């Protein structure tokens, strides 16, 4: 009965909205998003609690637009959806899969859902981890390759982004990214066994980031505005986000 009422309300909204004047750009966007959702059904926007499509949903946005930073979406959003779809099809779960939230946390991508069948859970987790790591390589503001990570509010940023930020905030705390920032995840199995997995993007990170940066160690000597102990604490916070550990130890 409740679902029927929602369908009626949505139908009435569509009738009421039929004379709404969309711009040419909006019409193109709606057309594009309908095609995108047909390809990836899990991008259809749903209420987080009821699982229902909002009554006033008009296809002017998708789940990818909701909370995923634009540079990440443009860099690897569709690529990620393609890999997710391929994995879901193996368990005939494409039309059942539901996203609960996409966001940035500790400077990296977080992708949450209601789960997937056990038969594909390991492969699916590897896909999500892969793109969480990839977000570390793509500046959240410019989409360019990352070189620095800020402290306090953690963000992985490019050289250009860093130059702009340091002008606006001369006291900005930061580190130059090095191989010690390459993630290593530890999986805990029910048996008590622990398995350490290196990032699938280790090679890309080694190419993009420095092996060692003396600049980080000399930061406090060169600029008295920074406190080395505070920076070290921030560094540990970045490492201990629950996903990876410091491989330099």
Image (cartoon, rainbow, N blue to C red):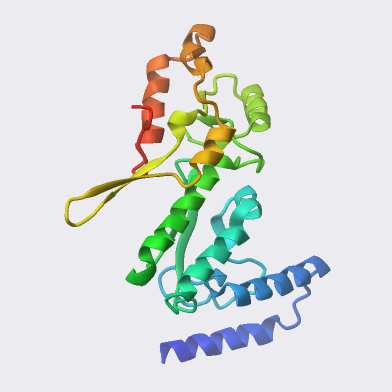
Task: State the residue at coordinates (46%, 66%).
Answer: 99
Q: Position of residue 30 (x, y in %)?
A: 71, 72
Residue 157, horizontal then vertical, whole percent = 59, 35
Who is closer to the viewer here, 107 or 138?
138
The image shows residue 117, relative to residue 181, as above or below, that is below
- Residue most toward the right? 24
Q: Quadrant of residue 12?
A: bottom right
Instruction: Classify residue 10 as left or right of residue 2.
Output: right
Which residue is located at x 48 percent, y 51 percent? 130
Q: Is residue 141 left or right of residue 107?
A: right
Q: Residue at x 54, y 75 (%)?
A: 54
Horizontally, residue 60 falls left or right of residue 228, namely: right
Left or right: where 37 falls relative to 106 = right
Q: Position of residue 182 (x, y in %)?
A: 45, 36
Residue 67 vertical position relative to residue 21 in the rendered view, above or below: above
In depth, the one of 246 and 30 nearer the eye is: 246
- Quarter of the figure that contains the N terminus: bottom left
Kindly give the residue lying farthest to the left in the view shown: 191
Q: Nearer the viewer, residue 187 or 18?
A: 187
Q: Quadrant of the C terminus?
A: top left
Residue 229 figure quarter: top left
Figure disc tally: 0
What residue is drawn where x is 42% and y is 21%?
Answer: 231
Question: To which quarter of the image does residue 50 belong?
Answer: bottom left
Q: Is residue 69 visible?
A: yes
x then y, percent, for residue 39: 61, 74
Residue 63 seen in this snapshot: no
């Amino acid at each position: 009965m409740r679902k029927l009422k929602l369908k009626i309300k949505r139908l009435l909204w569509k009738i009421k909205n039929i004379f709404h004047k969309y711009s040419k750009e909006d019409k193109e966007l709606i057309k594009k998003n309908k095609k995108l959702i047909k390809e990836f059904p899990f991008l259809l926007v749903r209420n987080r609690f009821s699982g229902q499509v909002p009554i006033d949903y008009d296809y002017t946005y998708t789940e990818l637009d909701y909370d995923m930073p634009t540079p990440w979406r443009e860099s690897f959003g569709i690529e990620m959806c393609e890999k997710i779809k391929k994995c879901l099809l193996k368990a005939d779960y494409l039309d059942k899969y539901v996203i609960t939230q996409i966001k940035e946390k500790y400077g990296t991508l977080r992708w949450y859902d209601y789960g997937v069948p056990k038969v594909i859970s390991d492969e699916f987790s590897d896909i999500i981890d892969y793109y969480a790591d990839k977000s570390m390589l793509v500046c959240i503001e410019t989409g360019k390759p990352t070189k620095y990570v800020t402290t306090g509010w953690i963000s992985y940023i490019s050289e250009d982004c860093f130059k702009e930020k340091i002008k606006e905030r001369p006291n900005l705390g930061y580190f130059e990214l090095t191989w010690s920032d390459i993630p290593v995840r530890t999986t805990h199995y029910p048996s008590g066994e622990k398995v350490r997995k290196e990032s699938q993007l280790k090679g890309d990170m080694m190419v993009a980031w420095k092996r060692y940066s003396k600049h980080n160690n000399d930061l406090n000597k060169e600029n008295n505005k920074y406190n080395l102990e505070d920076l070290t604490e921030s560094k540990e916070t970045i490492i201990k986000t629950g996903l990876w550990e410091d491989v330099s130890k």
